[in-house]
Amino acid sequence: MDCIHCKSPNPERWFYCRKCGKKTSDTKFTTNLFMMSQLGKRTDIELTSTTVEEDIKAMNRRNYAKGW
C-alpha cells in the first residue's frame, strides 16, 4: 500500500508515511459511520464530565458498598 500523498511505498503498512509524514491512507471510520451504527443509535448512554478526585471517591463508595 502506497502513501496517498507522495506515492511512496509503505510495505510495513505504517499509519503515517515515513517520507512525507502524512497519513498513508484515507480515514475509513468517521463520526457519521458511528452514528449510523447500532451503538451510535443508543440513547441510554449518559455522558458526564467529572474530575479525577470525584471519580476516585465514587469508585471507593462503590467498592465499600460491595464490601471490598
Image (spheres, helix red, strand yellow):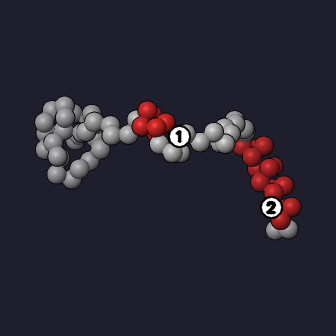
Circle 1 residue: 40
Looking at the picture, which amino acid does disc 2 mark?
A: Asn
Quadrant hosting residue 60: bottom right
Looking at the picture, which amino acid does disc 1 mark?
A: Gly
Tell me the crowding category of disc 2: few under 14, some 14 to 19, or many 20 or more residues within 10 angstroms, Cα based.
Answer: few
- The residue under the point 28% across, 41% down is 16
Secondary structure found at label 2: helix
Q: Nearer the viewer, mark 1 or mark 2?
A: 1
- The residue under the point 28% across, 36% down is 26
Tell me the crowding category of disc 1: few under 14, some 14 to 19, or many 20 or more residues within 10 angstroms, Cα based.
Answer: few
Picture layout, residue 15 above or below residue 65? above
Label 1 close to label 2 by CB (< 8 Å): no
- The residue under the point 22% across, 41% down is 18
Q: Which mark is residue 63?
A: 2
- Which badge, 1 or 2, comes first in the chain's sequence? 1
Q: Quadrant of the C terminus?
A: bottom right
